[in-house]
Image (spheres, helix red, strand yellow):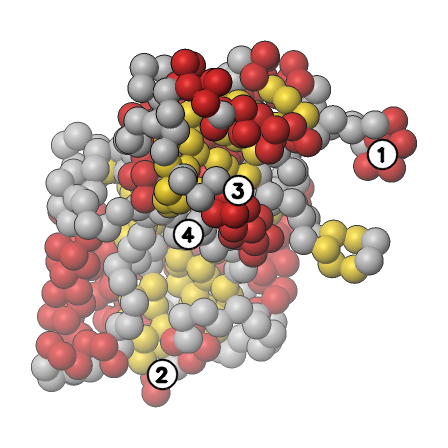
Amino acid sequence: MNYSNRRNNYLKRLPKRSLSLFFSGSAPKQTVDRSYPFFTNRNFFYLTGLEIEDATLVLVKGDQSEGAYLFVEERDAFRTRWDGPVMSFDEVAKASGVDRTHVFRKEELKTHLNRLLSTTRQAVFGPLEKIFLDLERSEVDQAENIESSFARYIHEHYPFLDVGRSTYFLAEARMVKDPEEIERTKRAIEITKDALTRAARSLKEGLYEYEAEAEFNYVLDSKQLKPAFETIVAAGSRATTLHYNANNKPMQDGDLVLFDLGVRYANYNSDISRVFPVSKTFTKRQKEIYQVVLEANKKTIEWLKPGVTFKAFNDYGRKILIEGAKRLKLIESDEEIGNVYYHSLGHYLGLNVHDVGNHDLVIPEGALITVEPGLYIADERIGIRIEDDILITKDGAINLSAMIPKEIEEIEALCK
């Protein structure tokens, strides 16, 4: 990936005479001598390709010129013995595309910032008037604290700087995926298919939901990969709870099992939902309900194209579900659809499962989104959601997860 191009694309959106800072974050403490696994700030990774702790990217947009600087850890021999080596400055520069002469020790950040803001350095970038920080992000609490703390530092030491939020600009930039991002997502989907197939074939009466989850995880573990999010394996009425993930109940004969799961591959995510019958075949009633959800899924994918809004996207799929729910005698009026369908039809997909994006803008060519209609009837112990990962193209949309079975005949054949 060309991270220099990404940084340039971001800077094009900013006003002149501005600074932007992005922190990689650090692993929160679990105990006195142990930390949780480290997960890089998504915007820092998007702009640098680096997965390193305690690093900072500084981007400058002056009157006539721009600059990119990285501040990273330089580990001493004692720390290396305990925690291993870190990337050298040369490796950091090569991986990120930042000029080697612009890579510094992390301890030099505030000194360098002071130089950029001093009157003697205005000949390089001109006077800097605004600083943008990634202040509206919710992936990692520790990273949020770092940014909030730095905002206070700026207010105290550089009160003339206007503090703004970079989140809006990055959200727009990340809406359109480049070819490498799409390839990584495709690979995540392929692995999801293999893992889900193994889990689906394990279903039987008396099997615990966590045992099916273990079959899914086996494939991921064999490739040193992690789930994109907490896997949902919900049998029977538990599938009517959207965020059920206890996965600790046995399956009964006649149950449908809803899988909502994904794989994180090279930091890009899949997000797939499928439903399988424990008894290997659907009942007549289950087929009727399933077919309505499948119709909403397929017709919406066929309808999607660049230039539509998220509201239009949701309204289109919702209308199909309303008409189907009326045929099934689940509702009488349009307004009642909220009783059996209570989530949006999809979301952006990428470095985050629910990826950033500006929903006030139309869905652009090159976007990755999910399409996930559902129906949930608690008194019939039925919850059905069918979710695919979709690439918006110039002429319409491509279902990247089309190889994962979802037709009733395909599902029954896979189970058998």
Q: Quadrant of residue 119?
A: top left
Callout 3 environment at 10 Å: few (<14), some (14 to 19), or many (20+)? few
Where is residue 77 shown, x and y percent of the image? 87, 27
Q: Nearer the viewer, residue 63 or 47?
A: 63
- Tell me how far mark 2 sits from mark 3, CA to CA: 58 Å
Q: Which residue is mark 4?
A: 136
Marks 4 and 2: CB-CB under 8 Å?
Answer: no
Callout 1 environment at 10 Å: few (<14), some (14 to 19), or many (20+)? few
Against 394, is 405 above or below?
A: below
Marks 3 and 1: CB-CB under 8 Å?
Answer: no
Marks 1 and 2: CB-CB under 8 Å?
Answer: no
Which three-letter amino acid code belongs to the residue tagged 2? Ala
Q: Is residue 243 visible?
A: yes
Q: Which residue is mark 1?
A: 79
Q: Which residue is mark 3?
A: 157
Where is residue 312 shown, x and y percent of the image? 13, 55
Which three-letter amino acid code belongs to the residue tagged 3? His
Which three-letter amino acid code belongs to the residue tagged 1? Arg
Against 288, is 104 above or below?
A: above
- Tell me how far mark 3 sits from mark 1, CA to CA: 32 Å
Marks 3 and 4: CB-CB under 8 Å?
Answer: no
Q: Quadrant of residue 67?
A: top left
Image disc number at residue 378: 2
Residue found at x 79% / y 53%:
34
Is tag 1's residue or tag 4's residue first in the polypeptide sequence?
1
Element type at marker 4? loop
- Tell me how far mark 1 sits from mark 4, CA to CA: 33 Å
Is tag 3's residue or tag 1's residue first in the polypeptide sequence?
1
